[in-house]
Image (cartoon, helix red, strand yellow):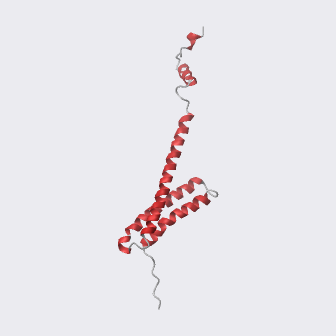
Amino acid sequence: MNPAPQTPAFAHQAAKLSWACPVVVFVMLALGRRFSAPVIIDLVALLLIVVGLAFGVIALFGIPKHGVKGILAQALVGIILNGLLLSIFVTNFMAARANAMQQHTSRELPANSPASASTIYTSAGMSDGREWFTA
């Protein structure tokens, strides 16, 4: 009789998933923008990045029980790749947010422009002093 094939431990599977998630993210971002909404693709990519990072850390906790072989290198590669992708995601998010805030504030009329000053004075029933010079 043949013994039942031994399945790899969860730590080994988590280590493989930790580096497989960034690969899936790369493929999804490369191909997915043509077929779906970019916001949904970005949110799914963020979810995969966080899951991959979590699986890498979980795999490291399996080293004392299952040994370093097949876990440490894969988990570290996954943690590094997911960490880099997460830092790129956060940096791009912050830059896009700053850009949106700047565009939002530039839509408003600047307070020191001549049109806004005369509009404020005349709407309040005040004079801006220009009538003294129109003699």
- The residue closer to the viewer here, 126 or 118, is 118
- Residue 8 visible, this angle: yes
Which residue in the rendered view is the most extreme toward the bottom? Answer: 1
Compared to 64, does 134 lie above or below?
above
Could you tell me residue 92's position as x and y percent? 52, 49
Which residue in the rendered view is the most extreme toward the right? Answer: 34
Which residue in the rendered view is the most extreme toward the left? Answer: 64
Could you tell me residue 71's position as x and y percent? 43, 70
Could you tell me residue 66's position as x and y percent? 38, 74
Which residue in the rendered view is the most extreme toward the top? Answer: 135
Could you tell me residue 35's position as x and y percent? 64, 58
Compared to 95, does 60 lie above or below?
below
Total marks shown come to 0
Who's the residue at 52% across and 40% down the image? 101
Q: In which quarter of the image is the C terminus?
A: top right
Compared to 87, does 124 lie above or below?
above
Who's the residue at 51% across and 45% down the image? 95
Compared to 70, does 4 lie above or below?
below
- Residue 55 visible, this angle: no
